[in-house]
């Protein structure tokens, strides 16, 4: 994974320093050292707050491990795919993971760490912008569930543990202790499965050598509460300049907002719910407006409906499409077998309306 840009971090440090300085200034009451406060009376007795107990790695691991799963995702026709981790949310088999673990998968198989059983899984929904997905395991009962905490109370230098399927090898999850070094990181993540890049914001940064396969795993606090979903690890550029390895996680409050949206059954431009519909096209932004069809994939809906490479989609059911992202968002809320009416502009400027029946696609 690519490291985040350093300029924003320096700005953040400067802002924090300014705020701390302002707080000290505003707290000044006009007293001189060794003098009693105005109005007489004895000096106030300073209060010392007790330090939090250190994180016990063995205790945290024992609490979290049974509520984790190993995930294996594969794609047709060659069986290529990804391995990752997941967090059990319900005894009946709802599992939280990273979207990139199941992106493009035709089949998803899940091994529960608590009972060792293997389950086929269905993707209930996902938000690719937050890198969060919700799975459901077929036939699962009485699974050990994770203690879900809140990320709202996290502070810099808090001790945490990243626990997941390091290397994608299964077996006993790997637990790595570290401290939180940033509460609001922006990173550009490289998906090693398909080499796509995605900007992720609002990430927790952890000073710990997180590795591939731990994606979708748990970031836990000293009580064993899950406060984040592991997403990324620092990549080669960071190691080349001598930086210590670190990892990134989606804050738990962000992840659970996506889960609640999926459970509500109401899709949004970012949150897809249920089976994924596809036009079967590779697209890019058109100039001056629209979504250009770079490739209409043979045998899939757009190609079968007569759409051609180089044509531009300008509307879906009368709604204007100005960018490739807008087209993806419009299809994101549809379901397989639905019919959409596409406004299309040909190479010579001719415009037409084409009806296309969407097909079942993989989580995109």
Image (cartoon, grey):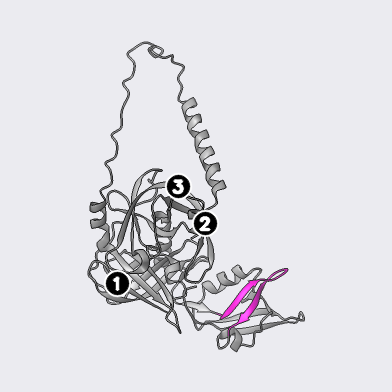
| Tag 3 near tag 2, CB within 8 Å | no
Which element is circle 1 on?
strand
Residue 70 x, y percent position in the rendering: 32, 69
Q: CA distance from mark 3 to mark 2?
A: 19 Å
Whichever of callouts 1 and 2 sits on the residue coming sooner in the sequence is 1
Instruction: Indicate the quadrant where residue 325 lies.
Output: bottom right
Alpha carbon separation for disc pair 1 and 2: 33 Å
Q: Where on the picture, by quarter, is residue 197?
A: bottom right
Q: Residue 182's mark?
A: 3
Vertical position of residue 182 compared to residue 231: above or below? above
Give the magenta range: 279-297
| Circles 1, 2 touching at the beta carbon (< 8 Å) | no
**Label 1: which residue?**
111
Whether 115 is among the magenta residues is: no
Query: Given this view, does label 1 or label 2 mark the residue nearer the observer?
Result: 2
Instruction: Tell me which numbered mark, 3 or 2, is placed earlier along the sequence.
Output: 3
Element at badge 2?
helix
Q: Position of residue 65 (x, y in %)?
A: 26, 61
Q: Which residue is mark 2?
A: 237
Left or right: 207 with respect to 329?
Answer: left
Measured from the top left, where is residue 112 in percent x and y? Answer: 27, 69
Q: Position of residue 170 (x, y in %)?
A: 31, 69
Q: Residues within 10 Å of mark 1 (few under 14, many from 20)?
A: many
Nearer to us in this view, 257 or 216: 216
């Amino acid at each position: 994974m690519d490291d985040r840009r350093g300029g924003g971090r320096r700005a953040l440090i400067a802002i924090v320093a300014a705020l701390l300085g302002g707080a000290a200034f505003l707290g000044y009451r006009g007293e001189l050292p060794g003098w009693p406060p105005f109005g007489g009376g004895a000096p106030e007795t300073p209060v010392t707050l007790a330090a939090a107990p250190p994180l016990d790695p063995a205790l945290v691991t024992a609490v979290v491990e049974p509520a984790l799963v190993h995930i294996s995702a594969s794609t047709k026709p060659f069986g290529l795919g990804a391995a990752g981790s997941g967090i059990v949310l319900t005894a009946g088999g709802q599992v939280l993971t990273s979207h990139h673990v199941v992106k493009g998968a035709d089949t998803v198989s899940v091994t529960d760490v608590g009972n060792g059983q293997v389950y086929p899984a269905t993707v209930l929904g996902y938000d690719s912008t937050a890198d969060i997905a919700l799975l459901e395991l077929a036939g699962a009962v009485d699974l050990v569930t994770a203690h879900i905490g809140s990320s709202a109370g996290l502070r810099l230098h808090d001790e945490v543990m990243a626990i997941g399927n390091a290397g994608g090898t299964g077996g006993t999850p790997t637990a790595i202790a570290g401290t939180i070094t940033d509460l609001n990181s922006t990173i550009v993540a490289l998906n090693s499965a398909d080499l796509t890049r995605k900007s992720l914001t609002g990430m927790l940064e952890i000073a710990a050598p997180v590795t591939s396969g731990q994606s979708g795993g748990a970031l836990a606090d000293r009580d064993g509460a899950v406060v984040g979903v592991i997403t990324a690890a620092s990549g080669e550029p960071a190691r080349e300049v001598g930086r210590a390895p670190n990892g990134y996680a989606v804050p738990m409050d962000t992840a659970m907002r996506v889960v609640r949206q999926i459970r509500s059954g109401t899709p949004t431009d970012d949150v897809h719910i249920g089976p994924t519909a596809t036009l079967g096209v590779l697209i890019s932004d058109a100039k001056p407006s629209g979504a250009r069809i770079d490739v209409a994939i043979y045998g899939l809906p757009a190609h079968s409906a007569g759409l051609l490479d180089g044509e531009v989609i300008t509307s879906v059911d009368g709604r204007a499409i100005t960018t490739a992202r807008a087209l993806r968002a419009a299809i994101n809320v549809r379901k397989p077998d639905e019919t959409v009416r596409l406004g299309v502009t040909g190479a010579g400027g001719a415009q037409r309306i084409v009806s296309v029946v969407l097909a079942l696609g993989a989580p995109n």
